[in-house]
Amino acid sequence: MKKHSIRNAILVLILLLIVSSAAYGMTRYRSIKNAVNSSFNASGVTKERDVNKQLAGKKPISILLLGTDTGALGRSYKGRTDSMMVVTLNPTTNKTTITSVPRDTAVTIPGFASQSPSKINAAYAWGQAKTTIGTVQKMLNIPIDFYALINMGGMEKVIDQVGGVDVTPTLGFTYEGYTFKKGVKTHMNGKKALAYSRMRYDDPDNDYGRQKRQRTVLMALVKKSGSISTLLNQSFISSLTKQTQTDLTFDDLTSLAQNYRSATKNLKETHLQGTGKELNDQSMEVMKKSELQRVTNFIRNGLSLPSKKTGSIAIFNNASAKDKHRGSRSISSPDDIDSSAATTESGSGLGY
């Protein structure tokens, strides 16, 4: 999430828009189905669970959301992902969980051990969705049922579609030609909201501070749109599906729209908290094992799965690593990292 990272704020909303589009598509079935299915791209992963059975039984599912700069900058669906989130939808508990994974998280990517340690965002560049899903599953010991890759172009479209959003900046700064004043309520169009959400280096909390701004934009967008169904016209859905790739079919999305919308009534979110260190001449986020276990527990609980030990491919320590303050205190070893990452919950709902 170094340079172009709005996605953590918008990915979930775009997912809900896609889900809603399937429901809306019942009245314009063929055109919407064709648009949605044009986004389909199989991951190549052998699923850890029978996802058809999960959907048919209205059981909790997980979706890995990936954000990239592709398309918006005239590039193809290649390169590194800039954002990564694990979303769980649980219609039994009526809860949705969102877990942000820093793109700089240090891991050993399966199949690329010779490149270890690597940033987790390299997984997509080296093996696309298949390798990315496998990496997240092994790092946290969780099942990933589906994925959705969304590019930057979707951000401006959604915000502009609702006429912009109102946000009160928690930090004063100037970025990409826009000036933001702390504590002053500001109306933002898509480009301005993008600038507000993507700035990193002038934020004292770096990526973690930026993630907070991204979530603020998301909540403002949900509040402004009121009913997301008002956004769903055919031209908008068509433009949105051009910004995505996913292994969710139209029928899958229809099932989600019909049976999983109650899960969005309560939203609980967290992020994986690490400490910046220099590894392989790169700045990476090293996680404490107890922090990885906390996030594993959080996601598995969201899926109503029994507890299990976290995965083993994350980089836990490196004797030659140089400490670097990035959103948490400096340390002498990764085991000293403060793992008290914030978890927030909202009961206001993301109704549509």
Image: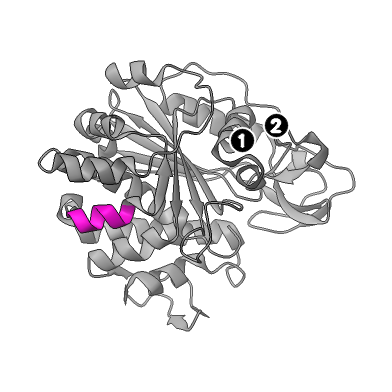
In this rendering, is residue 252 above or below 174?
Answer: above
Q: What is the residue that sits farthest to the left in this orientation?
A: 27
The quadrant where residue 286 appears: top right
Q: Position of residue 208 (x, y in %)?
A: 56, 56
Report the label total.
2
Q: Please say whether residue 260 is one of the residues in the magenta stretch.
A: no
Q: Residue at x 51, y 19 (%)?
A: 48
In this rendering, is residue 110 above or below 11?
Answer: above
Q: Position of residue 196 (x, y in %)?
A: 45, 70
Which mark sits nearer the N-terminus, 2 or 1?
2
Q: Do the CB atoms of the residues marked 2 and 1 lie less than 8 Å apart? A: yes
> Callout 2 environment at 10 Å: few (<14), some (14 to 19), or many (20+)?
some
The answer to whether residue 168 is visible is: no
Residue that carries the numbered disc 1 in the rendered image: 131
- Secondary structure at numbered mark 2: loop
Left or right placement of residue 6 versus residue 257 in this view: right
43 or 352: nearer the eye?
Answer: 43
In this rendering, is residue 8 above or below 290?
Answer: below
Q: Position of residue 287 (x, y in %)?
A: 68, 41
The quadrant where residue 134 appears: top right
| Amino acid on which disc 2 is placed | Pro
Left or right placement of residue 45 versus residue 334 in this view: left
143 or 129: nearer the eye?
Answer: 129
The quadrant where residue 136 appears: top right
Residue that carries the numbered disc 2 in the rendered image: 110
**Quarter of the figure that contains the N terminus:** bottom right
| Amino acid on which disc 1 is placed | Thr
Magenta stretch in the rendered image: 233-240
Q: Residue at x 58, y 58 (%)?
A: 207
Q: Position of residue 298 (x, y in %)?
A: 49, 31
Q: Please say whether residue 238 is one of the residues in the magenta stretch.
A: yes
For the residues labelled 2 and 1, the Cα–Cα distance comes to 7 Å
